Image (tube, helix red, strand yellow):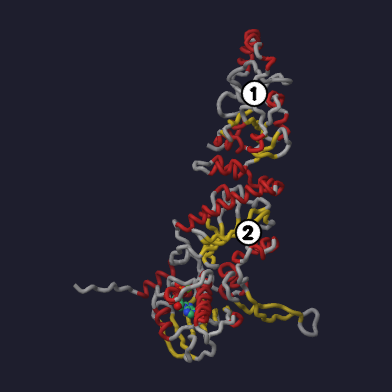
Amino acid sequence: MAKKQFKAESKRLLEMMINSIYSHKEIFLRELISNASDAIDKIYYKALTDDSLHFDKDNYYIKVIADKENRILKILDTGIGMTKEELENNLGTIAKSGSLSFKNENELKDGYDIIGQFGVGFYSAFMVADVVTVISKALGSDEAYKWESTGTDGYTIEPYEKDLVGTEVILKIKENTEDENYDEYLEEYRLKAIIKKYSDFIRYPIKMDVTKTKPKEGSEKEYEDYQEEQVINSMVPIWRKNKNELTPEDYENFYREKHYGFDKPLTHIHISADGAVRYNAILFIPEKIPFDYYTKEYEKGLELYSNGVLIMSKCSDLLPDYYSFVKGMVDSEDLSLNISREILQHDRQLKLIAKNIKNKITSHLQSLLKDDRDNYETFYKSFGRQLKYGVYSDFGSHKDVLQDLLMFYSSKEKKMVTLDEYVSRMPEDQKYIYYASGETVEKIEKLPQIELVEEKGYEILYFTEDIDEFAIKMLMKYKEKEFKSVSSGDLGIEAEENQNKTEEEEKENKDLFEQMKKILADKVNDVRISKRLKTHPVCFATDGEITIEMEKVLSQMPG
Ligand code: ADP
Ligand code: MG
């Protein structure tokens, strides 16, 4: 039987596509600039194999021109251009990508990958324009053509005059409606911002005529506007540069330019991975806690680029929660994107990159702790709590890694120490890692419970944050040593002089204790002789796993 072809209502298809695949209208500019950049790349590739072609980088650029009065936005490039056939095939056929064919026909060099692949980006222009006109002259051709369409009712092609090889895409910007503002796509500042946001690392200059003011000639008080051509994008992505060429200031500037924070980065990690996963990344640990960090509003995530074009501003899958303070970006050529050029949700590459990044952050923190203690402590002051949350909420295996990054205030050193430092100087007869909980170091120092442990010469870790004890309970042990609260019933030490006295005293004072228990009936479970008190007459103790400090936290929790 003869096969019948599907019929598609292409008008409807186009309408649907234009209005449904992109979540932000502003990306039309990203798409048109990406096409322009691809077109210049194609000349570059042709020149590699064609001796008669000479690629002089200075001659190639993209220009964005806004004409507010006539509601015209023009994006022109000096790229390879399109012949009449190419205009028909590439712009007249939805989902036909001339760029993808080009990629398949030419062997492309790493790092100069062409962006286009789906053959739909161009149509995003219809999200903001009523009419789209494309004037193009192909490389090696004497003729130029004009392609024009209002989107849904087809297109026209006719010969046209154009001197330079390349393409002009001319958008007649829509009038504002009640819920949509289109004027903004004619505003200089807005266009600049969109270019910066999505296309900052396009390899060719993206130029715009920018309005400036200068004093009027012969007058000191009057000013006049004038236009100056400016390159808007930074072009060379800093993450593609060699680490040795970059100074700390370069990284700092990048941090500010990208608005990762208002502070300075405390430290940065520059990764150029070239193994099973290929990606470049620049990550920062901020110096200060972002103001909303410990709130629900804070969103973790890294910027995700595919080939220098921004795909996602906050890709949360790239960071585990316990490293949510990390800022920065990742660029990879290996990502599988969907047709609106968003990242696929369960991308295998993305998972590999995320894992890789996690390990890099861990080892960076480890070496910071080892080689740059002061900076590590600054970091820990801000984000140590997040690491402890990480330990506490561990159902996997990351606590093994995180436990070595933890620090607590030590009774012995009077400063922050790691668990490893604590354990490595434990006397042989010491069974447990001791800790005492309280609101502040000063308050803990006054606890009667710490006396006996201190007298034995054992070090005590001071837990001053709510999360501390919860995290430690999750760890249970560190290097085979259990954690022990100084207020727990059995400390594993007994004050020698108290050894045999206890039972006697217990009997002697039975009545007194009974009386005390009666009076404190709703406040305590039991009153008994303590073996650990030295200079204080009395202290609180708990029997179970939950200490008094934990009880306080739990009782404050909603629920
Ligand atoms: P994609 O970029 O994914 O291929 P587009 O819909 O953005 O899809 O573009 C379709 C095709 O039109 C491109 O593959 C390219 O062949 C052609 N094209 C679009 N814009 C230009 C341009 N400025 N210069 C040359 N060719 C272009
Ligand atoms: Mg495209």
Residue, disc 2: 260
Amino acid, disc 1: Phe
Q: Is residue 254 left or right of residue 131?
A: right
**Image: 398 above or below 109:** above
Mark 2 to mark 1 CA distance (whole Å): 47 Å
- Comparing 39 with 159, the one in front is 39
Pointer 2 local density, CA inside 10 Å: few below 14, some 14–19, many at least 20: many
Residue, disc 1: 540
Locate residue 523, reporting x and y percent: 61, 22
Task: Residue at 62% x, 8% y: name it.
Answer: 507
Locate residue 408, reporting x and y percent: 66, 38
Q: Secondary structure at mark 2?
A: loop
Pointer 1 local density, CA inside 10 Å: few below 14, some 14–19, many at least 20: some
**Image: 310 above or below 478:** below
Amino acid, disc 2: Tyr
Is the CB of the residue bearing disc 1 within 8 angstroms of ligand 1? no
Figure quadrant of residue 78: bottom right
Check residue 513 in the rendering and tell me which mark sits there, or answer none: none
Task: Residue at 61% x, 16% y: name it.
Answer: 517
Task: Residue at 61% x, 78% y: name it.
Answer: 207
Locate residue 200, reporting x and y percent: 59, 69
- Sequence-wise, the earlier of marks 2 and 1 is 2
- Comparing 274 with 544, the one in front is 274
Task: Using the rendered image of the protein, determine whether residue 172 is visible from the camera's viewpoint.
Answer: no
